[in-house]
Image (cartoon, grey):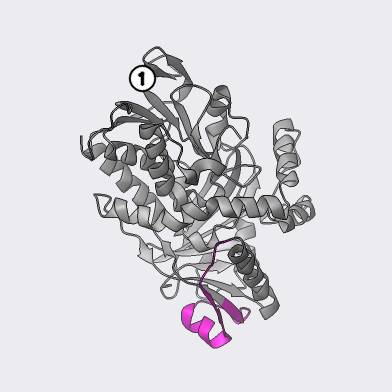
């Protein structure tokens, strides 16, 4: 086994359910602590939200979704199917129960608590990536500022105020306001409609699908097995836990980690986790561009993120509360294009490829679920919302510490799944 010597009393074996960035990071850091790991996923490595997201490793922009303004915006968006935040008017009682809890958390005290909870993850998230890329994960991260572009200085000031709120809560973000000339130099594709910008320094980005696939290869190279099946149940027995497939086959281990993203509640609720996780689905696609972009571009007025990707531009946006497995809605893609087309020049929108929808796991209080459950030997890791890629590796490292030492790290107290 590659890694440090196994701690006395630590589990010798683990099953990680979920082969996204959170699950595979947990597997890697468990291996680092001498634990034999089997990874299970119903669809394979990077099949969920880990593949098609914007690829930002951006501790400076991990802004909780439950900001008070989001509640007002959501109410205004209910009857606008083209709005970036889309809540279908369905008769799904569980969705409306979730949204009621979310609305109750759209208050500054709840938002501030989520910001403070994220501080230790933000402090160490880039360093956790560096540990992985220095030890066999062969897809590098790229250091680059994120440039937010706006149609007016008043719009830019709204982001600056948000960054000040983050700083007041303990999360200082190095940023600089950009003139029109500076913005054009930073983002050559900016149209005449964009007049001012804010550069957020100290951030990174990565090809998310390639990174997670490389992480999966590294986990296998260190001795893990990755199996594909849908998990029906996890229960404890005298020797540890048993993970049961839909077809009746089982895998036994001393501990299990549920890291199934937007599907987390299906298994976690059986272990006493009452905070629900819902799918906040995001869309993305790739477009050719007239000239390459050097770093990520954020268009807050359209709520769209753009990232250099395979010689083009990956465009990602929207927050759609629908079932995680619901089919892709082309109207959502058209709405993203309609909102961004006036803001960027030199983009061949009609030649888009890799059109994708993926379910981001959202909790009602803006805090992830990381740690032990009521079921002995069963842990969960998920509910990171839009920041699963940024916080995946550090989540895996901290959870592996808890599993192998039996002690909850201070950084995970606010993410207790049993809160």
Residue 200, percent from left and from top:
51, 71
**Extreme residue in the left direction:** 1
Q: Nearer the viewer, residue 238 or 243?
A: 238
Q: Nearer the viewer, residue 284 or 139?
A: 139
Residue drawn at the location 32% of the way across and 56% of the way down: 130
Q: Which stretch is magenta?
A: 170-197
| Residue drawn 48% across the image and 46% down it | 411
Counting labels gives 1
For this view, does 285 lie left or right of residue 156? Answer: left
Q: Is residue 339 magenta?
A: no
User: Compared with residue 384, is residue 115 higher up or lower down, i.e. above or below?
Assistant: below
Residue 116, percent from left and from top:
58, 54
Q: Is residue 195 visible?
A: yes
| Frontmost residue, 183 versus 160 | 160
Quadrant of the rendering where the N terminus is positioned: top left
Which residue sits furthest bottom?
Answer: 181
Above or below residue 359? Residue 121 is below
At mark 1, the secondary structure is strand
Q: In what quadrant of the picture does the C terminus appear?
A: top right
Percent x, y for residue 290? 44, 75
Q: Residue at x 48, y 53 (%)?
A: 120
Magenta stretch encompasses residue 173: yes
Farthest residue to the top: give it.
Answer: 238
Q: In the image, residue 402 lies at what x, y percent? A: 41, 36
- The reply, left or right, for residue 156 in relation to residue 172 is right
Residue receiving disc 1: 251
Q: Quadrant of residue 194?
A: bottom right
Other-residue count near label 1 (Cα within 10 Å), few / some / many at <14 / 14–19 / ≥20: some
Residue 64 vertical position relative to residue 3 in the rendered view, above or below: below
């Amino acid at each position: 086994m590659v890694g440090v010597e196994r701690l006395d009393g630590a589990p010798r074996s683990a099953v990680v359910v979920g082969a996204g960035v959170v699950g595979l990071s947990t597997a890697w850091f468990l291996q680092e602590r001498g634990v034999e790991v089997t990874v299970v996923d119903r669809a394979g490595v990077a099949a969920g939200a880990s593949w098609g997201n914007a690829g930002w490793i951006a501790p400076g922009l991990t802004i909780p979704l439950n900001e008070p303004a989001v509640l007002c915006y959501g109410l205004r968006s209910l009857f606008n199917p083209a709005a970036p935040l889309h809540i279908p008017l369905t008769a799904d009682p569980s969705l409306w129960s979730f949204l009621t809890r979310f609305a109750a958390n759209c208050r500054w005290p709840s938002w501030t608590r989520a910001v403070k909870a994220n501080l230790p993850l933000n402090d160490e998230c880039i360093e956790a990536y560096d540990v992985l890329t220095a030890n066999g994960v062969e897809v590098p991260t790229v250091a680059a500022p994120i440039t937010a572009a706006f149609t007016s200085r008043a719009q830019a000031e709204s982001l600056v105020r948000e960054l000040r709120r983050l700083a007041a809560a303990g999360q200082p973000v190095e940023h600089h306001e950009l003139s029109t000339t500076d913005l054009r130099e930073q983002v050559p594709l900016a149209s005449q409609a964009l007049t001012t910008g804010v550069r957020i320094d100290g951030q990174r980005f990565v090809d998310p699908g390639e990174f997670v696939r490389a992480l999966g290869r590294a986990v296998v190279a260190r001795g893990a097995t990755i199996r594909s099946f849908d998990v029906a149940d996890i229960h404890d027995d005298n020797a540890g836990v048993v993970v049961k497939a839909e077809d009746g086959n089982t895998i036994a281990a001393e501990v299990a980690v549920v890291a199934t993203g937007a599907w987390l509640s299906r298994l976690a609720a059986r272990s006493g986790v009452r905070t629900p996780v819902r799918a906040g689905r995001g869309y993305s696609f790739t477009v050719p561009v007239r000239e390459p972009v050097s770093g990520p571009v954020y268009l807050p007025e359209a709520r769209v993120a753009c990232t250099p990707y395979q010689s083009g531009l990956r465009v990602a946006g929207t927050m759609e509360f629908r079932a995680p497995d619901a089919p892709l809605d082309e109207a959502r893609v058209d709405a993203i294009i309609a909102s961004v087309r006036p803001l960027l020049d030199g983009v061949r929108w009609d030649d888009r490829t890799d059109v994708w929808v993926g379910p981001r796991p959202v909790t009602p209080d803006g805090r992830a679920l990381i740690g032990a459950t009521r079921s002995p030997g069963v842990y969960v890791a998920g509910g990171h919302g839009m920041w699963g890629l940024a916080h995946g590796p550090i989540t895996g490292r901290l959870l592996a510490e808890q599993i192998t030492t039996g002690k909850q790290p201070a950084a995970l107290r606010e993410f207790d799944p049993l809160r």
